Amino acid sequence: MEHLYCEWHDYDLLCERLAEQVHRSGWEFDEILCLARGGMRVGDVLSRIFRKPLGVLFTSSYREQGGTEQGALRIGEQIAATAALKGPRLLLVDDLVDTGLTFVALLPEIKRRFPQFAEVRTAVIWQKASSQFHPDYVAERLVGDPWVHQPFEKYDRTLPTDLPRSDLN
């Protein structure tokens, strides 16, 4: 399997590239909804740049084999936000589109559950070559289907006892 390793500096640049694409499109949106967990950092960055409210929808499909194999999609019941997202234009954000199955299943479900969103556009950092879904905004289209290693994933293998001891008490 091919691997792509992304460090924080490159991750930040890709988020900025994504923001620039959305901005250049001229599309005005009201709120951002990010998919947790992978889309949370992207959503946070875009929310800050565009000064738009941010909501979080918890989804999960990569639970099998230590998070490396896609299983059945689970979608949270509610959007977490400090105030209700009213729409009507929503930017749906995630870190990447792999097979595309999450977006294919999720978009009709969002429209069914949350009818206030009359228009939903999608934005991701990476789109893999074999994806069945093509987001509206993509920072980097990959030529293959590498396993993407993101900078924060080091914490997937870290326990509190692994952290260096600090004297901040």
Image (cartoon, helix red, strand yellow):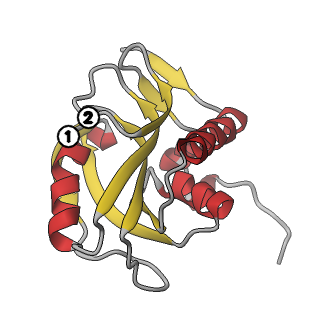
Q: Is residue 121 left or right of residue 151?
A: left
| Residue marked by disc 1 | 101
Q: Residues within 10 Å of mark 2 (few under 14, many from 20)?
A: some
Q: Is residue 118 left or right of residue 91?
A: left
**Placement of the C terminus among the 4 image quadrants:** bottom right
| CB atoms of marks 1 and 2 within 8 Å | yes
Q: Amino acid at mark 1?
A: Leu
Position of residue 51 relative to residue 83, above or below, is above
Q: Return the mark for residue 133.
A: 2
Identify which residue is drawn at 28% across, 75% down: 116
Identify which residue is drawn at 41% across, 68% down: 56
Expressed as whole percent of the image width and height from the top left, the position of residue 73 reads 18, 52
Q: Amino acid at mark 2?
A: Phe
74 or 137: which is nearer to us?
Answer: 137
Q: Is residue 37 left or right of residue 20?
A: left
Using the rendered view, name the quadrant where residue 90 is placed.
bottom left
Secondary structure, mark 1, is helix
Secondary structure, mark 2, is loop
Expressed as whole percent of the image width and height from the top left, the position of residue 165 reads 76, 60
Identify which residue is drawn at 16% across, 50% down: 105
Position of residue 18 relative to residue 98, above or below, is below
